[in-house]
Image (spheres, rainbow, N blue to C red):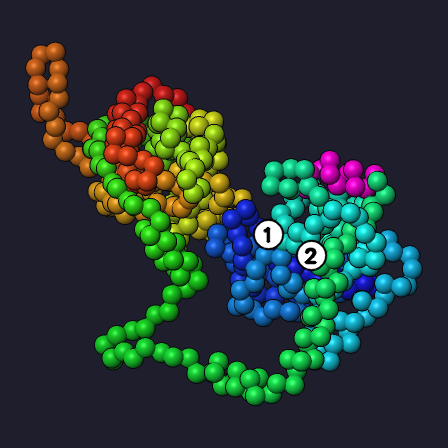
Amino acid sequence: MARVEMTMPKMGESIMEGTVLKWLKQIGDTIEQDESVLEVATDKVDTEVPAIYAGVLTEILVQEGQVVAVGAPIAIMETDAAAAGAAAPSAAPAAPQAAPAASSNGSAVPFVPAEAAATVAGAEHQPGRFLSPLVLSIAREEGVSMSDLEYLPGTGKENRVTKKDILDYVASGKPSFTASAAPAAAAPAIVAAPVAAPAPAPQAAAPQAASVKPVPSVSGGQELIEMDRMRKMIAQRMVDSKRISPHVTSFVEADVTNLVNWRNKHKDAYKKREGENLTFTPLFIQAVARAIQDYPLINVSIDGDYIIKKRDINIGVAVALPSGNLIVPVIHNADQLNLNGLSKKMNDLANRARANKLTPADLEGGTYTLSNVGSFGNVMGTPIIMQPQVAIMAVGAIKKKPAVIETPQGDLIGVRQFMFLSHSYDHRVVDGSLGGMFVRKVADYLEQFDPNTAI
């Protein structure tokens, strides 16, 4: 059996690290291919990490609660699958594999695969790169090792490995890769292990330092509550957004009487037919998506001195969790869904968010965000932009108000349903005219809602 490293996978384009929450397997356990090995928390979602190969877990390199960069080793497995993928017939490369086991302090040393014995010119090492499930599936079926996938040149976007790339590689006989840095990287690790072992003083001091956790002094009339992991991330992201984007907020009040009457007319039948609630949120999402089509420069992000205009309209919706925290799942291509599709998608995302069953894909790619502060009884709010987006809208509670109604016979006083819309935008690229016209257009779509709309 061959020793292979299990590394922290890349679980999204913007995710660069993860926190190990819980090991589901222990040293000595036999693991099947695609069986979950550990739970990992990222700044987007908690998820389980499966094993790429079947084998036996021999070493755990990171502890629960430790933050690990994408591509960094987290465990070592013994597996036949890696040996099959190596395709190195001679025993000559065995020396680099045996070196880690000979480390004097027993710590894990980066595994140098047998593939490093041969060279393919121009191969660049790309550890931790994103690999699609399809590419990984083909790699397993064809016996291509993870180390070869890290060197395999990609022709896709951002040098990603495509289906054609890996099929061409298999068809060419799976030539082995190497990078001159691979042996060099392994050598310092092997030498450094015995050097670090004889340093008893720092090791002895470490437990003492860890055992003394500074606690702020509080009086008996106060309770000290440590932020949980998600709250810490939310706090950091909000501070970063305020630092990055100069926020401006515009407000509009919309008469949504037709909208309210339409929902009241259909909600019971919809509940009976679909088994789900018909809320106002899909109606708001539809109006926002239409307004983005009218004002596409709201659907952008900033990269240095460049404005990146997004073709897809992916609307994130803030969802309150039972813990009190917020999470923002994304409805991708919201402009392509009808009201029923938006309603079912929103209900599904909200239910899975509250059950902690969202996937990284559910939280990626948002281009605009909607926050329904009215669900908490608030009439308006000034939301903070979700980076790297440039705008966010808050919809307030719907309230009955007396209003002047214009009729052919003259003006009358009547009771109407009103709601405030709050639009926060990044003044670096969205000026007051664009930000104000956009929120006004959303209000127009809500006020002009056709009461004969079918769902």
Disc 2 or disc 1, which is closer to the eye?
Answer: 1
Sort mark 2 into few (<14), some (14-19) or many (20+) by Cα contacts within 10 Å.
Answer: some
Which residue occupies 48% across, 35% down? 332
Instruction: Give the Cα separation between the discs numbered 2 and 1.
Output: 14 Å
Q: Position of residue 155 (x, y in %)?
A: 67, 37
Label 1's element?
Answer: loop
Give the extent of the magenta segment. 161-171
User: Looking at the picture, which amino acid does disc 1 mark?
Assistant: Lys
Q: Is residue 430 magenta?
A: no
Classify residue 447 by image quadrant. Answer: top left
Instruction: Name the one closer to the observer, 174 or 342.
Output: 174
> Looking at numbered disc 2 in the image, what kind of residue is underneath it?
Ala
Query: With 196 as the anchor, is 96 left or right in this view?
Result: right
Which residue bears the numbered disc 2?
A: 51
- Tell me which numbered mark, 2 or 1, is placed earlier along the sequence: 1
Residue 314 position in % (x across, y down): 45, 35
